[in-house]
Amino acid sequence: MSDRTAVTLLTGFLGAGKTTLLNNLLSDPLGGRIAVIVNEFGEAGLDHDLIESTAEDVILMASGCICCTIRSDLARTLGDLYDRRSRGELAFDRVVIETTGLADPGPVHHTLMLEPEVSRNFRLDGIVTVVDMVLGTVTLDRHAEAQAQVAMADRIVLTKTDLASDGQADILQRRLDQINPRALRIRASMGRVASGCLFDLDQGRSGDSAAAVEWLGMVASPDPLAGLSGFGTASKATALPGFPSTAPHHAQGGSICTASIFIDTPIPAPVFDFWLDMLIGIQGNTILRLKAIIHIEDAQCPFVLHGVQHILEQPVPLKTWPAGDFTSRVVLIARDSSVEQLTAHLEMLRLRPDPSRINYVVDSGPELPFKADI
């Protein structure tokens, strides 16, 4: 992890204030050396002209919305940045990708996870979503893209706070609670926030137990989670079963909701496999984000599991997890679902195998070795 360059995805709907925030980050001496990739519609990037930085530090992808651009475009751009730094032409410590207001954050995550040349040299540090406090509620009600941006966020930056009334602020906060209650929210003052609030957000992937709990945003108390087939080293990714390897176009559909669960005893591995198959088979590509700390029976330590849309990162072992704590936690955020639906899926993790019914028959397929007692 430490050998790869951190990439921050800066997203948010049209007019939310991404460019103003980015300008302030670039002018912050504590922010370090930042290479910026700006994604714009059209041949002339207007926001690009507003970014106060040298041309060598900013690369403009005038190829439309990132979620409509083939993955290789972004991969080539990141590869070019890496090569230019290796030749001594550029000097930077991290990369910030500013998307268009209509971008789905998922494909950027997919590029960082699935493109071999990219994943070897870069890692996703976090998704930062900018939300306008004055128009944010209306935007979320009208645009599925804005909902997806909030749902996938690790940090939410609230802008135009001086212009929003108390009523507008309260309504927006409740709306954000419905979509992504666990992402830390930061109020920007004239587009200014401390750079430290927006960087080094990938603690869930670090293998540190305390950081993983903070990343998940859940306090241990009785209720989630899971096991996983295919444990391995961190920093690899796989597509969930039943999904294509390419990302969808723009976000579609209506409301987004979240649900979570705690489970205080280790989960049998077959239960998690069964749960994952059922989740994907029924929910399909409505899943926007999956975050979990997983305790599996007979495993030496729990694992962090992280998925964005149809891409699951390889589990990260938490080797420093305190002895005696076997509580698993899982969070689901999905589109076009209800809290009741997501909760019903999560409750399946409480199933336990019935040894008397484990009867795998090669010709006719396995009988489900579970008691449906939830």
Image (cartoon, helix red, strand yellow):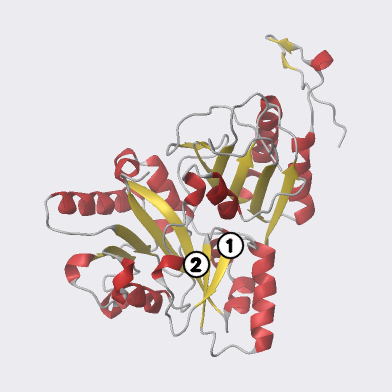
Element at label 1: loop
Residue density around tag 1, few if under 14, some if 14–19, many if 20 or more, within 10 Å: many
Q: Amino acid at mark 1?
A: Ala
Q: Amino acid at mark 2?
A: Thr
Q: Residue at x 46, y 40 (%)?
A: 245
Q: Which of the numbered marks, if any, corresponds to residue 183?
A: 1
Answer whether residue 309 is visible to the viewer in this image: no
Q: Nearer the viewer, residue 302 or 120?
A: 302
The residue that label 2 is drawn on is 129
Residue 122 in picture, x, y percent from top left = 33, 48
Residue 162, compared with residue 153, is above or below; it is below
Residue 207 in picture, x, y percent from top left = 49, 42
For marks 2 and 1, give the CA distance.
Answer: 10 Å
Residue density around tag 2, few if under 14, some if 14–19, many if 20 or more, within 10 Å: many
Residue 313, compared with residue 150, is above or below; it is above
Residue 165, compared with residue 60, is above or below; it is below
Element at label 2: strand
Labelled pair 2, 1 in contact (Cβ < 8 Å): yes
